[in-house]
Amino acid sequence: MLDKVDVRIPEFALPGPAIAEAFAHLKEHPIPPFRPSRYYKYVCDCRENFDVDAVVHLELRFGRSTHKVEIIDAGKKSVQEMADTVSQVFQVDPWTLGLMRVDLAADVEGVPVPWFRNHAHVNRKQFSSRIEKSQELEVQFVGMGRAEAQTLYAGKRPNLIRIYNKLAEWRTQLKKQEMNCRRFNAGMKGLEMSPEQMHYGTRIPPTFAELCRAEGYEYQEGNILTRIERQIGGSRFPSELTTFNDLRFAHELTPFQGLRLVGREPIRQFESPPDGVPIRNWLAALGLEVLQQQLGSAQVAQATVLKHGKGNGRRILESLAECLPKRREALTMEEIQESFRKSTLLQTSHCG
């Protein structure tokens, strides 16, 4: 999918209907919600103030005074909807604009992030297990101790491959929503409101499954969803992806061709027990699998448990049947490419 899209706006472009009035006042003096930033004279989040899903950056401080539009939630929009968003904030033909940054993403189910650390290789780049972050180098492995927080980077900004736990990102978003709801509800307690007003005014955050559904994903307990992103920016755009019009054909790209996967063994999630499984049973199930590998046969291993189980062998085997981590076939680059193609085709198939 096209997960993030930033476009460059010519310096003499006129403001669009959404910001025209506010833009006129900026010529006289700075006004909220516009504020200065490091690289641009003004920046404004247009969602709350102008009901447009974009962040606008006005007048680049270095070189020509061009502008930039960041399209918010690009992954949920078609390319046509992105073009309409740009037209709301600037009077330009969006299809002729140059691209400043594009994130191309594919989602893979059942493959945890740590698996990629041992099985993924990027040409001329390296994944690292060092917790390291600097302005010059962006090669890091974050969250080594907690599987749900793990992220891999290969390369450095503005061009890199990022692999991360998408469900963990959504859980973080949910925690923020829950905190905002608690703050809002606590603030209502100091107001003179009837019980009925309090009831209907109370904000209730969504469940995690509801949040995932709003993102277009049907969540079930125990699911693993890993996102692979190719971030492209600066001067590293390929010839077939330089203008906004090229996004119409983004589903034909092969953004992960520099990524290679090694190892063909089945994939399992060993970082934590399956949901609802006691840690003791999980460890015992892993031990049973090791025993099967050592003895060369599941039948011989189970016979050993029955022999030494003191009458409880069959019950023990039944209790361990659902304790092993889920298994899936080895991941292939073709699977990653197909995931990208299908999700991106949904965005590019309705261009006007």
Image: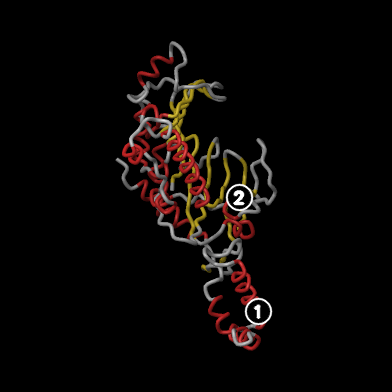
Question: The C terminus is located in which quarter?
Answer: top left
Q: Which residue is mark 1?
A: 291
Q: Residue 203: percent from the left, percent from the top?
A: 39, 41
- At 51% from the left and 67% from the top, the residue drawn is 328
CA gap between label 1 and label 2 equals 33 Å
Question: Amino acid type of disc 2?
Answer: Leu
The label shown at residue 152 is 2
Question: Amino acid type of disc 1?
Answer: Leu
Q: Nearer the viewer, residue 150 or 172?
A: 172
Secondary structure under tag 1 reads: helix
Q: Residue 336: percent from the left, percent from the top?
A: 49, 57
Check disc 1: other Cα within 10 Å, few if <14, some if 14-19, many if 20+: some
Check disc 2: other Cα within 10 Å, few if <14, some if 14-19, many if 20+: many
Q: Is 17 on the left or on the right of 341, as rendered?
A: left
Q: Residue 247: percent from the left, percent from the top?
A: 41, 42
Q: Is 194 on the left or on the right of 129, as rendered?
A: left
Q: Earlier in the sequence, mark 1 or mark 2?
A: 2
Identify whether 105 is placed above or below 10: below
